[in-house]
Image (cartoon, grey):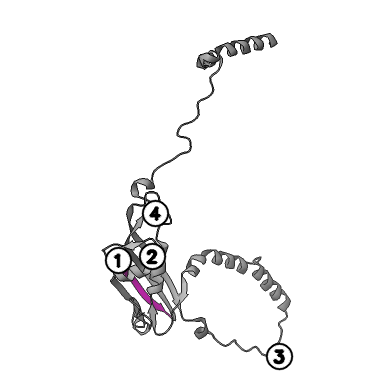
Amino acid sequence: MQEAPTFSVPLADLDYGEREIDDEIPREWLRRTFEGSEAVPRDQPGRLTVTVSKSGREVMVRGKARAYVTMPCARTLDPVDFDLVADIFLLLGPPSGSAARPAPKTPVAAKRPANAASNDKKASNDKKGKGPRGRRKRDDEALLPEEEAARDTYEGDRVNLDPFIREFLLLELPMVPLREDLRSEESPAIERPLEPAPEGRQAQEAIDPRLAPLAAIANRLRAKKE
């Protein structure tokens, strides 16, 4: 038997205006959400605060989901508390099959306009991105990825938010959980710049006394070559 959703909104209710959800997220719901990960919900329940609205056949969900979990530190394995805050933004539409429309019929003997060739060339340039429409299309495509990433579908006469909230919260889990005192710790490979090698008399003073005879011979040979 399929589990009833904890957070859902009837589509019919959205026809009368937006709907606000401000409810606790039960700890048991969070436990199932984080099952399989290293996160364990703390005793404090989470919180869901979203606004659900409808425009045409699309449903928009905006708000935040909060959860409070404990994870083992990646370095010390000590338990570390994390407060997760997920920003929720969704654009949900009906399944693609239900929104399909029949293609408009094209007249069989449609008269081709005199400037059809130039129009075809312009349309071709637009498709290739050379014309103004093509440039606008590329600009729009640059702005759409974030919106497209938020698109999904709903099914039936209710909008079930549970799977989307789970996904948003899971994405907030840190990939490398660390204790707070280790998160800003700097571990440079070289703690200070290397000092330049001593030259001249300073170099002689820095030589190990046991190597002084060899250094003297090297200096005499160098003097003879000069």
**Disc number lying in front (4 or 1):** 4
Amino acid on which the number 1 mark rests in the picture: Gly
Q: Name above or below for residue 60 compared with residue 171.
A: below
Amino acid on which the number 3 mark rests in the picture: Ala
> In terms of sequence position, does the residue under pointer 4 or pointer 3 come before the other?
3
In the rendered image, the residue lying farthest to the front is 210
Q: Which region shows up in magenta?
A: 45-55
Q: Residue at x 48, y 35 (%)?
A: 190
Residue at which label 3 appears: 109
Residue at which label 4 appears: 177
> In terms of sequence position, does the residue under pointer 4 or pointer 2 come before the other?
2
Q: Is residue 79 left or right of residue 191?
A: left
Looking at the image, which is closer to me, 67 or 34?
34
Looking at the image, which is closer to me, 86 or 219?
219
Residue at which label 1 appears: 46
x%, y% of residue 210?
53, 14
Q: Name above or below for residue 63 compared with residue 2.
A: above
Crowding at dot 1, Cα within 10 Å, few <14 / some 14-19 / many 20+, comes out as: many
Crowding at dot 2, Cα within 10 Å, few <14 / some 14-19 / many 20+, comes out as: many
Element type at mark 4: loop
> In terms of sequence position, does the residue under pointer 4 or pointer 1 come before the other?
1
Q: Residue at x 40, y 49 (%)?
A: 75
Amino acid on which the number 2 mark rests in the picture: Leu
Residue at which label 2 appears: 169
> Rounded to the nearest whole Å, what is the CA distance between mark 4 and mark 2?
15 Å
Query: What is the magenta segment's predominant secondary structure?
Result: strand
Amino acid on which the number 4 mark rests in the picture: Pro
> Rounded to the nearest whole Å, what is the CA distance between mark 3 and mark 2?
58 Å
